[in-house]
Image: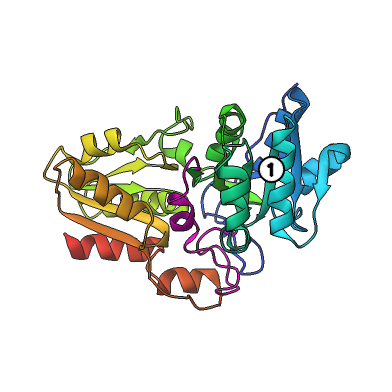
Amino acid sequence: MARKYEARKAPEGERQATSAMIASLAAEGYDTVAAPFGNALVDAARKDERIVGLTADLGKYTDLHIFQQAMPDRFYQMGMAEQVLMSAAAGLAREGFIPFATTYAVFASRRAYDFIAMAIAEENLPVKIVCALPGLTTGYGPSHQATEDLAIFRGLPNMTLIDPCDADDILGMIPQMIAHDGPIYSRLLRGKVPSVIKKHKPDYRFQLGKAQMIREGKDVLVISTGVMTMRALDAAVKLADDKVDVALLHCPTIKPLDLETIAAEAAKGGRLVVTAENHTLMGGLGEAVAAGLLSRGIAPRFRMIGLPDAFLEAGALPTLHEMYGISVGKVIEQIKGWL
């Protein structure tokens, strides 16, 4: 019987801390779900014997340790060698398994890219690569900040890309990743992950390859992905107090991008269109949306929120998010300035 995932209520007045040491992004005022990826994968594996889990000495930091504890005979510890991790996952996939390989996003995208390209993507194998510390979700600095991972993988044929916003996206994406017959790279939020979207849209369900309207508005259309959907929703609520009406289109799948829905919303006219992503502005959601709109002859007023084309500083996450323009306050400030 599948486990029911209970959200933990945020006590009145509680401020949840975000630590530079832990790859978990808490959000003030939202309920949280503990380790949604690890628990959902265990439930799925109980129903499907093909599912196995692999990690590169980072099980505890990708929530795969939950899978390890529940199914030790289907867990593989590959050590600090992402190239070996991806090669082993490819081999298991060739033998009919569905491997979930976890590590940090920087190590998958930078260190093991050629192995992923040649052993997994070219062969179109059903390896699911799930990576913690996406974008600016750690204060450790350039060695751990995967600010360009989506750009790296967007150009790789056969590779599907997911950037989930919250616990509900993560819980919803696991069965769809398993059903998808091909390789997937997904960013991951670990630990106590907030449940955000359903607070704004109770009937929301993750759909692979689909963008969904979470909030309607007549002044601004924000097209966002990952944790920036979380930030943009909070910004939209506060902007409403200043009579700025913000619509939000959530795009958890970066590739294939749902350009049909994006174009239909952007073509409505009269609205400032803003993309928001926890990723460098080079080669991510913003550029993909811009190219898609222009190729369809749609040219709205257009701006992008994201990280700069630079190696970022180390430090406390709230300070870094403010510094690089992806805090709620900075999102509000930028939208007001563009209006």
Query: For residue 72, which quarter of the picture?
Result: top right
- Give me the residue at 70% from left, 39% from top: 99
Name the one closer to the observer, 120 or 267. 120
Q: Is residue 63 visible?
A: no
- Magenta extent: 133-159
| Percent position of residue 297, x then y | 13, 42
Q: Is residue 159 visible?
A: yes
Name the one closer to the observer, 193 or 102. 102
- The secondary structure that dominates the magenta segment is loop
- Give me the residue at 33% from left, 60% from top: 305
Circle 1: element type:
helix
156 magenta-colored: yes
Judge the density around disc 1: few (<14), some (14-19), many (≥20) Cα neighbours within 10 Å.
Answer: many
Query: For residue 270, which quarter of the picture?
Result: top left
Name the one closer to the observer, 76 or 198. 76
| Percent position of residue 183, x then y | 57, 39
| Percent position of residue 40, x then y | 68, 35
Give the residue at the far right of this rendering. 73
Q: Is 36 drawn above or below residue 15 in the view shown?
A: above
Q: Which residue is mark 1?
A: 90
- Give me the residue at 45% from left, 31% from top: 204
Name the one closer to the observer, 241 or 140. 140
180 magenta-colored: no
Residue 194 left/right relative to 54: left
Give the residue at the far left of this rendering. 270
